[in-house]
Image (cartoon, grey):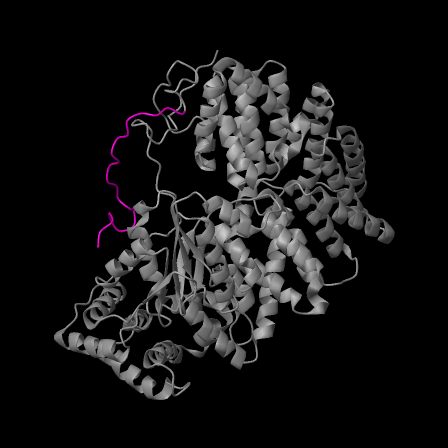
C-alpha cells in the first residue's frame, strides 16, 4: 500500500501553504513617481464602487496609475488582480476572447467566451483592469455591465479616454502632474539617460519651464527626457518652444493639453532622421509586440534597407519612441499606443498603409506556416510560446486578408495552419471563432478552404459539439472527394473516426481510423495529426477490450515521438499506456506515465490531457490505498471539465475509471467523507491540482484516518494571515 504525503487543501488549516497572489499585473520596470494624492483617492473609490473608470487625455498616465493602484490593492482580492490590455484588439468580436486570455482561462467547449467569463467570475472576488478600451467602448460597456451583474464579487478598474457610461460607474479624471511631480519625473528619467550628470541650478529652472510647456503630461515629459542624450535641458526647451509654434495644428477647439501631447510626440518626430521617421511609421502596422526579424522583413525596403533596421531601431529605443520587453520568447519591442497612432497617421499620409499591411500579413502567414511544420519537432514548446506572443499580429493578419475577396483564401490558410494552436494549446474557442469567420466569405473549395473545414470539425469534436463536427467533416469529405484532394479526404475520415470514439462507437472508430492511417501512408503524410490518429486507434482498440494491442500501438507511438521530439501527442499515448498498466496490476508504472502526461499538458495548456490524466490518476491512487486523496483528485478534475466540454464526453468508456474510483472510495470512506474530498479538490485551481498530483509543494504528513474530517477537507481554527508584500512596490499603503 502506498501512503502519500500531501499538504492540506483547506484554506482554514493553519498548516496549509499560502498560495502566491493570483493575477497578471506586470512588475514596474522603473520607479513610479508622484501621484501621492491621486492614488489614495482612486483606491478609495475602488473600495466604495464596483466600477471605476480612469479617464484623461492620451499620455496622462492612466495605464500606469491604474496598474499601480491594482498592485497596491491586490491583497483585497483573494482570486487575483487581472489586467486585460485591449488596445491591440481591433475587432469587437474578439473583446471577450481577449479578456478570457488575460484571465488565463482555457476553455475547450463551444460555450461563448462571455459565458466562460461569467461562470469563472460568478463566485470569485477579483479585480479586472481593462486598459485602452476606448475604440471598443460599446462592446466593452455591454460586457462589463453583464459581468458586474452576474459576478457580485467582481470589481472593475477601467482606463481609457472616455467613460463606459455603465450604471454605477464612478469616473475619476486623471489630471496632468503637478509641477513638483512633473519635475521629479523628468529628473528621474533624465538621470536614467545621463546618470553621470548632476543637474545645475540653471537646469532646474529650465526643467520647471519645460514641465510647464508640456502641461505636466507624463508621456511628453518622458519623450523630452529621452532627448538629453544629445541635448542640454536648455536646448530641449528652446527646440520645444519652436515646435509649439510649428506643430500645434489640429482643431482650434482642441484642449491645450491634447495639443501639448501631440506637440511633444510631433517634436520627437521632427528631431528624428528621415530613416527613423520612416521606421516609426512602418512599425505602426504591428499589433502589440514584435521582434527584430519581423521588423527587418516588414519595415525594410525602399529608403531603409533591411540590414539598417537594427541600427535605426536602437536609435528609436534611445529616444523612448520604442520600448523593449524581454520575455520567454526573447527580446521584443512595442510602441506606446499614442506613439503608434502618430506613426500610423504618417504612414497613411505617405499612402503606404495597404502595402505595409500586406507585408505584415505575408510575414505572419509565413510564420504560421513554419510553426505548423515545426510543431512536429523538439521545438514544440518554443512554437507554442511564439504563437502565443504573436497572437495579436496573427489576428491582424487574418483581418487584413478578409478585407479583399481576392485574398480570403489567405485567411483560410492562416486559420487552418494554426490548427495545432487551437487544438493543442487551449485556444479552441477563439479558433472556432476564426474558422467560422473565414468560412463566411464564399470562396471555391480549394485546399485551404477544405483544411479550414476539417480543422473546424476537429475543434467541434473536442468541444463536444457532434452536430457541428459532422456537418463540417461531411462537407469537407464530399468536396474533397469531388475535387480529388486526397489529403483533405484523409483528414476528414480521421476526424470522423475521432468523433466516433467520443460518441461511444469504438468499432466504427477503429474502422475509420485504420482507413485514415492507410490514406496517410499513401500520400506520405507524417505529423502530429497522424500520430494522434494512431493514439486514437489505440483508444478504440482498448475500449473494445484488447489492451495488449492498444499498448503495442502506443509503444510504437512512443518511439516515434522520441525520434521526432513530439510531446503533445505523446501525452495521449502515455494516457493509454497508463490505462493498460493499471489494468495489468502495475499502478506505480501507471502513476509515472500519468505524471509525465500532466507535465506535458501543463506545458501546452492542454485541458483535455490534464482532466483525463487526473481522472485516471484518481483511480490509480485509490488502488494504491489512498482513498481520501483519490476523492480530492476527482474533485480537481470535476472543476476542470466545464472548461473542456461535456465531462468525459458523456462517454461510458472514458467515464469507466471515474465510476470505478467513485465506487471504491465511497465503499472505503463512506458518502460524507467522499463528498468532503470532492469539495476539497474543487477548491484547487488547475495549477495547484497538477502540482499536488505531481507530488510538488511539500507538506506535512497526512492524517492516518482516510476521509475523516481532519483529512483533505478538514476544518480547524483559522490562523490570522501574516502581512505580505505585494511584490510590486511594497505592502498596501498610500
Percent position (x, y) of residue 127? 38, 51
Residue 539 found in image quarter: top right
Percent position (x, y) of residue 669? 48, 15
- Residue depicted at x 31% and y 52%: 71
- Residue depicted at x 27% and y 57%: 44
In the image, which residues are magenta? 713-734
In the displayed structure image, the side of residue 403 where residue 55 appears, left or right: left
- Residue depicted at x 52% and y 58%: 95
Residue 234 found in image quarter: bottom left
In the displayed structure image, the side of residue 262 where residue 221 appears, left or right: left
**Residue 566 visible:** no
Asked if the stretch drawn in magenta spans residue 722, the answer is yes
| Nearest the eye: 233 or 456 | 456
| Nearest the eye: 661 or 613 | 661
Residue 124 found in image quarter: top left
Vertical placement of 662 versus 521: above or below?
Answer: above
**Residue 432 visible:** yes
Residue placed furthest toward the top: 1
| Nearest the eye: 353 or 729 | 729
Percent position (x, y) of residue 487? 78, 47
Q: Quadrant of the C terminus?
A: bottom left
| Nearest the eye: 718 or 255 | 718
Vertical placement of 709 versus 475: above or below?
Answer: above
Asked if the stretch drawn in magenta spans residue 243, the answer is no
Percent position (x, y) of residue 674? 48, 21
- Residue depicted at x 55% and y 41%: 643
Residue placed furthest toward the left: 201
Count of labels in the image: 0
Give the main secondary structure, helix, strand or loop, of the magenta stretch: loop
Amino acid at each position: 500500500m502506498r501512503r502519500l504525503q500531501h499538504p492540506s487543501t483547506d484554506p482554514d488549516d493553519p498548516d496549509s501553504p499560502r498560495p502566491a497572489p493570483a493575477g497578471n499585473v506586470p512588475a514596474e520596470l522603473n520607479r513610479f513617481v508622484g501621484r501621492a494624492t491621486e492614488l489614495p483617492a482612486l483606491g478609495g473609490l475602488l473600495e466604495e464602487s464596483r466600477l471605476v473608470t480612469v479617464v484623461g487625455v492620451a499620455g496622462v498616465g492612466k495605464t500606469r496609475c491604474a496598474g499601480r493602484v491594482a498592485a497596491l490593492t491586490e491583497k483585497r482580492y483573494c482570486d487575483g488582480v487581472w489586467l486585460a490590455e485591449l488596445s491591440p484588439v481591433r475587432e469587437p468580436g474578439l473583446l471577450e476572447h481577449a479578456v478570457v486570455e488575460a484571465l488565463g482561462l482555457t476553455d475547450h467547449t463551444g460555450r461563448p467566451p462571455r459565458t466562460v467569463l461569467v461562470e469563472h467570475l460568478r463566485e470569485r472576488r477579483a479585480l479586472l483592469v481593462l486598459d485602452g478600451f476606448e475604440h471598443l467602448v460599446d462592446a466593452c460597456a455591454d460586457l462589463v455591465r453583464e459581468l458586474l451583474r452576474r459576478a457580485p464579487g467582481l470589481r472593475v478598474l477601467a482606463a481609457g479616454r472616455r467613460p463606459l457610461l455603465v450604471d454605477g460607474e464612478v469616473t475619476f479624471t486623471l489630471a496632468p502632474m503637478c509641477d513638483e511631480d512633473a519635475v521629479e519625473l523628468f529628473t528621474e528619467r533624465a538621470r536614467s539617460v545621463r546618470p553621470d550628470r548632476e543637474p545645475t541650478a540653471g537646469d532646474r529652472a529650465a526643467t520647471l519651464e519645460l514641465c510647464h510647456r508640456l502641461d505636466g503630461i507624463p508621456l511628453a515629459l518622458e519623450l523630452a527626457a529621452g532627448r538629453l542624450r544629445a541635448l542640454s535641458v536648455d536646448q530641449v526647451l528652446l527646440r520645444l518652444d519652436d515646435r509649439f509654434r510649428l506643430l500645434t495644428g489640429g482643431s482650434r477647439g482642441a484642449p491645450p493639453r491634447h495639443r501639448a501631447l501631440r506637440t511633444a510626440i510631433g517634436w520627437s518626430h521632427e528631431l528624428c532622421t528621415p530613416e527613423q521617421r520612416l521606421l516609426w511609421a512602418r512599425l505602426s502596422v504591428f499589433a502589440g509586440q514584435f521582434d527584430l526579424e519581423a521588423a527587418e522583413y516588414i519595415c525594410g525596403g525602399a529608403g531603409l534597407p533591411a540590414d539598417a533596421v537594427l541600427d535605426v531601431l536602437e536609435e528609436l529605443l534611445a529616444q523612448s519612441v520604442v520600448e523593449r520587453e524581454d520575455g520567454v520568447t526573447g527580446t521584443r519591442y512595442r510602441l506606446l499606443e499614442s506613439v503608434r497612432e502618430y506613426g500610423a497617421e504618417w504612414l497613411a499620409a505617405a499612402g503606404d498603409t495597404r502595402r505595409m499591411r500586406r507585408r505584415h500579413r505575408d510575414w505572419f502567414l509565413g510564420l504560421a506556416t513554419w510553426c505548423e511544420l515545426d510543431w512536429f519537432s523538439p521545438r514544440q514548446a518554443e512554437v507554442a510560446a511564439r504563437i502565443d506572443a504573436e497572437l495579436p499580429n496573427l489576428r491582424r493578419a487574418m483581418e487584413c486578408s478578409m478585407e479583399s475577396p481576392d485574398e480570403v483564401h489567405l485567411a483560410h490558410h492562416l486559420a487552418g495552419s494554426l490548427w495545432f494552436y487551437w487544438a493543442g494549446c487551449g485556444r479552441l474557442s477563439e479558433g472556432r471563432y476564426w474558422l467560422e469567420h473565414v468560412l463566411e466569405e464564399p470562396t471555391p473549395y480549394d485546399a485551404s478552404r477544405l483544411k479550414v473545414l476539417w480543422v473546424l470539425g476537429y475543434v467541434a469534436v473536442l468541444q463536444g459539439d457532434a452536430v457541428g463536427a459532422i456537418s463540417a467533416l461531411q462537407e469537407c469529405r464530399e468536396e474533397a472527394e469531388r475535387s480529388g484532394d486526397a489529403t483533405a479526404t484523409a483528414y476528414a475520415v480521421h476526424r470522423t473516426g475521432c468523433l466516433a470514439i467520443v460518441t461511444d462507437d469504438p468499432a466504427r472508430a477503429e474502422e475509420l481510423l485504420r482507413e485514415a492511417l492507410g490514406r496517410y501512408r499513401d500520400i506520405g503524410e507524417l505529423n502530429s495529426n497522424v500520430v494522434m490518429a494512431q493514439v486514437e486507434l489505440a483508444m478504440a482498440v482498448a475500449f473494445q477490450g484488447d489492451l495488449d494491442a492498444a499498448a503495442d500501438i502506443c509503444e510504437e507511438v512512443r518511439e516515434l515521438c522520441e525520434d521526432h521530439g513530439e510531446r503533445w501527442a505523446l501525452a495521449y499515448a502515455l494516457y493509454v499506456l497508463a490505462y493498460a498498466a493499471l489494468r495489468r496490476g502495475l499502478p506505480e508504472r501507471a502513476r509515472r506515465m500519468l505524471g509525465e502526461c500532466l507535465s506535458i499538458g501543463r506545458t501546452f495548456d492542454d485541458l483535455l490531457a490534464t482532466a483525463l490524466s487526473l481522472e485516471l490518476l484518481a483511480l490509480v491512487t485509490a488502488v494504491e490505498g489512498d482513498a481520501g486523496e483519490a476523492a480530492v483528485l476527482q474533485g480537481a478534475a470535476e472543476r476542470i471539465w466545464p472548461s473542456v466540454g461535456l465531462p468525459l464526453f458523456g462517454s461510458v468508456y472514458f467515464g469507466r475509471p471515474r465510476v470505478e474510483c467513485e465506487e471504491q472510495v465511497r465503499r472505503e470512506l463512506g458518502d460524507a467523507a467522499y463528498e468532503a474530498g470532492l469539495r476539497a479538490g474543487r477548491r484547487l485551481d488547475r495549477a495547484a491540482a497538477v502540482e499536488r498530483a505531481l507530488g510538488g509543494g511539500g507538506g506535512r504528513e497526512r492524517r492516518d484516518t482516510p476521509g475523516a474530517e481532519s483529512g483533505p477537507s478538514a476544518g480547524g481554527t483559522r490562523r490570522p494571515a501574516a502581512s505580505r508584500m505585494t511584490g510590486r512596490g511594497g505592502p498596501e499603503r498610500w
